[in-house]
Image (cartoon, rainbow, N blue to C red):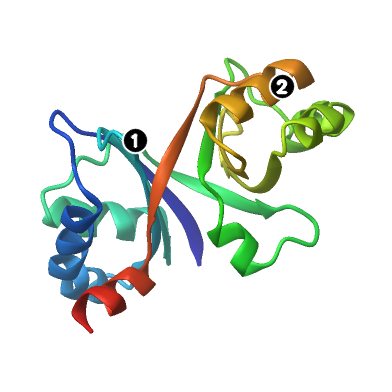
Amino acid sequence: MSEVILERKFDQPTTPQEVLDGLEVSGACFDIHRVNWNVSYLDLDGLRMVCHFTAPDMESTRIALRQLGQDTSRLWNAGQHDAPGADAAEIAAANVIVERSFADAVELQAVQDIEDAGIRCLEMRNVRFLRTFFSADRRRMLCLYAGPDAESVRQAQREAGVPFDDAWAFDRCGPENLVQASG
């Protein structure tokens, strides 16, 4: 199975409930193509979102999303890398995404080495790295952190000297929310 990431932008703010409503509608289409929706991270302003799927391959995800009328221009295969010792509950408590893009392909370890060297900067700001989604072409990274707020994570990244494009806080929309909403 492949880890697949979809990055979306919206013209109008989207709410967590609208995300969940859309996912309930897409269930049958996902089932046909064996696409499993794992979680979505919705920016607090509701204008961007990252969705994480597991599927036989990226094309299965692309087909299912296109049949639902979704834009798949920012769909990519990813490797998933968790922080050592991070458990599912800690990862579910992440509240900030850090976006990284690279002009040339990079090695995951090279970025990790920079962050490891600046770990004190993260600790001083009460920021903890939890998970990375690293693109198959090695030019895109989305990292999940737990921290007091997005600005604390940004400051920790700057102080540690880790390159990043943006950092933003999110609402987590996961399958557990569907169960709660219907029950």
Indicate whether 166 appears above or below 36.
above
Q: What kind of residue is marked 1?
A: Arg
Number of disc labels = 2
Q: Residues within 10 Å of mark 2 (few under 14, many from 20)?
A: some
Q: Quadrant of residue 157?
A: top right
Percent from the top left, x then y, of residue 12? 13, 32
Look at the numbered disc 1 and give the secondary structure of its residue: loop
Residue found at x 33% / y 41%: 49
Q: Is residue 113 visible?
A: no
Percent from the top left, x then y, of residue 118? 84, 26
Q: What kind of residue is marked 2?
A: Val
In the rendered structure, the answer to whether residue 18 lies left or right of residue 80 reads left
Residue found at x 50% / y 57%: 3
In the rendered structure, the answer to whether residue 30 lies left or right of residue 7 reads left
Look at the numbered disc 2 and give the secondary structure of its residue: loop
Along the viewing direction, whichever of 30 and 154 lies nearer the viewer = 154
In the rendered structure, the answer to whether residue 113 lies left or right of residue 178 reads right
Residue found at x 57% / y 15%: 103
| Circles 2, 1 touching at the beta carbon (< 8 Å) | no
